[in-house]
Amino acid sequence: MAPIRLLCLFFICILTACSDNTDKIEKYIANNTHKINSISPGDNNFQDLVKLGNVIGNKRVVLLGEQDHGDANTFLAKTRLIRYLHSKKGFTRILFEEDFSSLLLHDLNNLHNPTDRITNTLDDYWLKCKNFQPMIQYFNDTFKSSNPIIYSGMDIYIDGSVPTKLLELELKKIIESNPAIELEALFKDIVIFYEYSSKRKLGTLGREHIEKLYSEFNQLINKIQLNKFQEQIIENIQAYMSSLLADYGATIRDLQMAKNVLWYMNNYPEDKFIIWTANTHAAKNAWEMITGKYGRRRSMGEHLSKSIPHELYSIGTVSYAGNFGRVNQSLKQIKVPPSTSLDHWLKKNNFNYAFIDFSLFNSKVKNYSSMYNAKGLSHNLEKGQWHKIFDGILYVEKMKSCLN
């Protein structure tokens, strides 16, 4: 009986230790969650955001995530936070999950009207969502001021007829500056490739065609003369084709998005950047920390945290209940999380909106490795060390979709 008794005591000790460890993060959240008074973009009293601004400090890059691109209330919260970071903390440029090249090409081709830039380049799940309109209005308002906030992209996709046309114009410039190399036929095929991509018809081209195009592109590309911007465009074309052919295409995409952010930092050294993205891209340690759907992925946030650890602050968003849904998609209900989840611990503070910074916890509680539930990457519950996956969490208790 003694061995059985010892075995039982062993498991009790393990369970108790796990409970104690989970209690530490739960108690920290109970004592350190900061109330946010409003998510209304028109609320100019930013006193409730000063705490968040203080922990960001002088960092140049803030990753601002969302659980889904149909989270309308998150759009409002992010818009208000952006107004604060722009007006009070000196952030000057927003990088969206939109293609890297077309927004800069707008500038190079003197297409400076902000409405045209947004209409021609922004995805419908933002552009046509009612709760995103205050963000568009803020772009338009600041564009006319002495302190505009600039909207750019950092993704590898080129989507839409206008961005594809702008890419075609830039490829023609490359042809003209490299007259000794036959590029016209190859670049024509590249433009056709993006036209099919924009129409969601790449399957019509077939894998063999994309493999052949990718091979020909790589063989020629090292022989041509390019400026810094053109080099980055070419790198994004390579990354996009590679992501379509690889087993882990999402990882290639995230790596290139991180490279694009670093390109902006190097080429606009006076700017500070807000990255409007999904939680899956903003996460800093998703590969090691998470079990479940997104566990095999090195995110943009992870790459950036290794390249610019002292210049980066990553914010994930979490909601407790409600619904979500992108424009032109179906409405989905959010499942109420269990009492053992980060979402529930945040709700226990009885704040409609809140912010929690994990830096103090991570500095005081060393080697804390408990895994606990949260809807931290999407609206699905997953286990992870969420205090290491994000620097902070923006909490919106009740989510509403872009379909409401």
Image: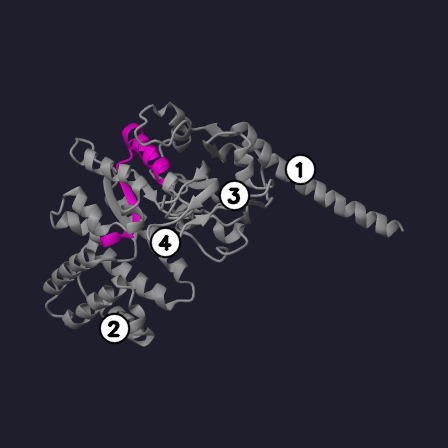
Precedes in sequence: disc 1 or disc 4: 1
| Label 4 to label 3: alpha-carbon separation | 29 Å
Seen from the viewer's position, the closer of residues 8 and 236 is: 8
Residue 172: x and y, percent?
Answer: 12, 63
Precedes in sequence: disc 2 or disc 1: 1
Residue 26: x and y, percent?
Answer: 59, 35
Residue 394 in view of the camera: no
Residue drawn at point x = 24 percent, y = 35 percent: 138
Circle 3 sits on which residue?
Answer: 386
Q: Is residue 11 left or right of residue 61?
A: right
Q: Is residue 173 above or below residue 396?
A: below
Q: Residue 245 in magenta? A: no
Q: Amino acid at mark 1?
A: Asp
Q: Is residue 199 above or below residue 122?
A: below
Furthest toward the front, the residue is: 404
- State the SS at label 2: helix
Q: How is the image coloured?
A: one colour
**Rendered image quadrant of residue 186:** bottom left
Instruction: Tell me the number on the disc at residue 205.
Output: none
Instruction: Tell me the number on the disc at residue 20.
Output: 1
Q: Amino acid at mark 2?
A: Glu
| Label 3 to label 2: alpha-carbon separation | 43 Å
Residue drawn at point x = 52 percent, y = 46 percent: 335
| Label 3 to label 1: alpha-carbon separation | 17 Å
Q: Amino acid at mark 4?
A: Gln
Q: Nearer the viewer, mark 2 or mark 4?
A: 4
Precedes in sequence: disc 3 or disc 2: 2
Q: Magenta region's main secondary structure?
A: helix
- The segment highlighted magenta reads 75-101
Seen from the viewer's position, the closer of residues 347 and 144 is: 347
| Label 2 to label 1: alpha-carbon separation | 58 Å
Neighbourhood count class around disc 2 (C-alpha, 10 Å): few under 14, some 14–19, many 20 upward: few
